[in-house]
Amino acid sequence: MVFFEPIRVYDEDFEEACPCNMAHMDIFYLFNGSSLNAYWRPIKFRRITEDPDNGKALKPSDFPWFENHALVMRKKAYDSLLDIFVKNGEVLPLETDDNVKLFVFNSQVIDALDENRSTLKRYPDSQKIMHIEKHNLSKQNY
């Protein structure tokens, strides 16, 4: 099994994306692979195309950075990788004002982590997993 986690490359000058209404951020923390298609209403996103610190234009990206738990993509990436995405979750449309089609991937989640054999960092107040430093998988769960 292969795990992929989007990471932000801070020295690159590529566009980012974010919800126009920051109150919509919470929906992306709920992504767990359960289908949202039946009631999904596209959330309005804006592309950040200029560096707020120096006004420099940012380069277009097939995967504008949003957050590491929700992969946002342009139509070109959606079209190229759709067969992989539909086998492993669902792709949901986002709304934009500038006619650039954006989508977000709701990844399938499976219970495959063997917590006893993995090296985990937990939130002290809840014992929820903050970060997986080294993972070991439980073969019977995937």
Image (cartoon, helix red, strand yellow):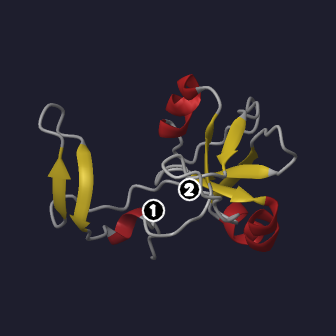
Q: Which of the 4 image quarters holds residue 64?
A: bottom right
Where is mark 1, residue-wise? 8
Q: Position of residue 43 (x, y in %)?
A: 71, 33
Disc 1 marks which amino acid? Arg
Q: Is residue 111 left or right of residue 86?
A: left
**Which is more toward the observer, 7 or 38?**
7
Q: Is residue 134 above or below residue 33?
A: below
Q: Where does the C terminus fall, quadrant-wise?
A: bottom left
- Residue extending furthest top? 23
**Which is more toward the observer, 4 or 22?**
22
Q: Secondary structure at mark 2?
A: loop
**Does residue 135 appear in the picture of this structure?**
yes
Residue placed at 57% from the left, 48% from the top?
Answer: 33
Where is mark 2, residue-wise? 65
Q: Is residue 52 left or right of residue 80?
A: left
Q: Is residue 34 left or right of residue 43?
A: left
- Residue extending furthest right? 99
